[in-house]
Image: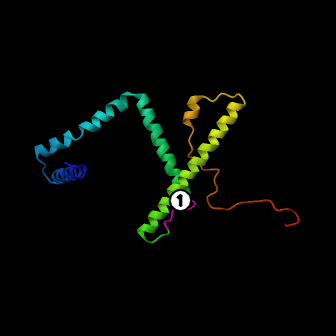
């Protein structure tokens, strides 16, 4: 059985179960199958509750994911979040360009953080590996998304 066929069968089974549970009087078998479906979730939650290191690792990944979403929202038309293309292909192109810009920002930040770490190490400062592990290239407060720049004019020009 292919993965697509297996997914289709799982979808049909879950839809059947949902419809049986929504009915006014679900059968004992329907309720038992519903309870059986909770076992994998319980097996996942037990180590999560028991292991603090595991919880911290998951929390770190969640924070990184949320940080990337914040960067994408900030980048997306200067926090306006407008898809300006009318057609699906144009919207896909716009979202692909957004992904490219976000990746460029992450790369730039990574290169500058590495240069800063090398500079600190060159001056003899020790960088704690736990602190370096917590660094994230997802910062964006230093980036001007709207293209508005300020500059000081010479007195003769002012």
The colour scheme of the drawn protein is: rainbow
* Residue at the image point whose x is 63% and y is 41% from the top: 113
Q: Quadrant of residue 78?
A: bottom right
Residue drawn at (42%, 33%) of the image? 55
Residue furthest out toward the right: 156
Q: Quadrant of the C terminus?
A: bottom right
In this rendering, the answer to whether 146 lies above or below 126 is: below
Magenta region: 77-83
Going by the image, does 62 lie left or right of 2? right
Q: Which residue corresponds to the image point at 62% horizontal and 61% vertical from the top-left?
A: 146
Whether residue 158 is in magenta: the answer is no
Q: Name the residue: 49% across, 63% down.
A: 94
In this figure, what is the number of numbered marks?
Answer: 1
Judging depth in this view, the residue of 65 and 48 nearest the camera is 65
Q: Position of residue 132 (x, y in %)?
A: 58, 34
* Residue position for label 1: 76
Q: Position of residue 100 (x, y in %)?
A: 52, 55
Q: Local crowd at mark 1 within 10 Å, few (<14), some, or many (≥20)?
A: many
- Seen from the viewer's position, the closer of residues 106 and 49 is 106
**Residue farthest to the bottom, as pictured:** 86
The picture places residue 59, in percent across and down from the top left corner, at 45, 37
Looking at the rendering, which quadrant does residue 117 occupy?
A: top right
């Amino acid at each position: 059985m292919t993965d697509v066929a297996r997914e289709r069968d799982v979808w049909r089974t879950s839809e059947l179960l949902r419809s049986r549970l929504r009915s006014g009087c679900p059968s004992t078998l329907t309720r038992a199958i519903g309870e059986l479906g909770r076992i994998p979730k319980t097996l996942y939650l037990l180590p999560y509750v028991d292991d603090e290191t595991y919880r911290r690792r998951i929390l770190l990944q969640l924070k990184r994911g949320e940080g990337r979403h914040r960067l994408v929202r900030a980048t997306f038309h200067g926090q306006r979040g407008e898809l300006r293309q009318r057609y699906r292909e144009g919207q896909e192109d716009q979202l692909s360009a957004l992904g490219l810009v976000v990746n460029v920002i992450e790369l730039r930040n990574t290169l500058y953080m590495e240069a800063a770490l090398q500079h600190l190490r060159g001056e003899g400062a020790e960088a704690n590996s736990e602190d370096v592990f917590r660094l994230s290239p997802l910062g964006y407060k230093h980036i001007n998304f709207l293209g508005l720049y300020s500059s000081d004019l010479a007195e003769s020009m002012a």
